[in-house]
Image (cartoon, helix red, strand yellow):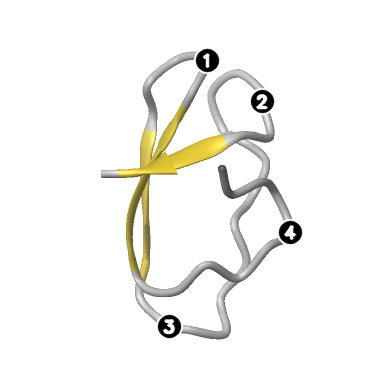
Amino acid sequence: MPTTGEKPGTGDYKCTKCGKVVNLTDDNESLPVCPVCGHKEWVKV
């Protein structure tokens, strides 16, 4: 499960706590802290 700070590659990632989806558009982009709830675990969708 990807976490904040990791660079898992391009695509959509959903926060495992609140469901917020973020989109990474660059392979060098890191996953953020969830902007809605502050959670740090994501799942690729």
Gap between marks 2 and 1 measured at Cα: 7 Å
Q: Whole-percent x and y of residue 6? A: 68, 63
Q: Whole-percent x and y of residue 18? A: 45, 14
First along the sequence among labels 2 and 4:
4
Amino acid carrying mark 2 in the image: His
Amino acid carrying mark 1 in the image: Lys
Residue at point 66% right, 25% down?
39
Residue at point 66% right, 46% down?
3
Gap between marks 2 and 3 measured at Cα: 22 Å
Disc 3 marks which residue?
26
Pick the front one: 29 or 41 = 41
Residue 21 position by quadrant: top left
Q: Residues within 10 Å of mark 3 (few under 14, many from 20)?
A: few
Tell me: residue 7, above or below residue 2: below
Residue at point 70% right, 49% down?
4
Tell me: residue 33, above or below residue 7: above
Gap between marks 3 and 4 measured at Cα: 14 Å
Q: Whole-percent x and y of residue 40? A: 68, 34
First along the sequence among labels 1 and 4:
4
Amino acid carrying mark 3 in the image: Asp
Tell me: residue 10, above or below residue 20: below
Disc 2 marks which residue?
39
Amino acid carrying mark 4 in the image: Gly
Question: What is the tally of numbered marks visible in this picture?
Answer: 4
Q: Quadrant of the N terminus?
A: top right
Q: Residues within 10 Å of mark 2 (few under 14, many from 20)?
A: some
Gap between marks 1 and 4 measured at Cα: 17 Å
Residue at point 53% right, 24% down?
36
First along the sequence among labels 3 and 4:
4
Label 3 element class: loop
Label 2 element class: loop
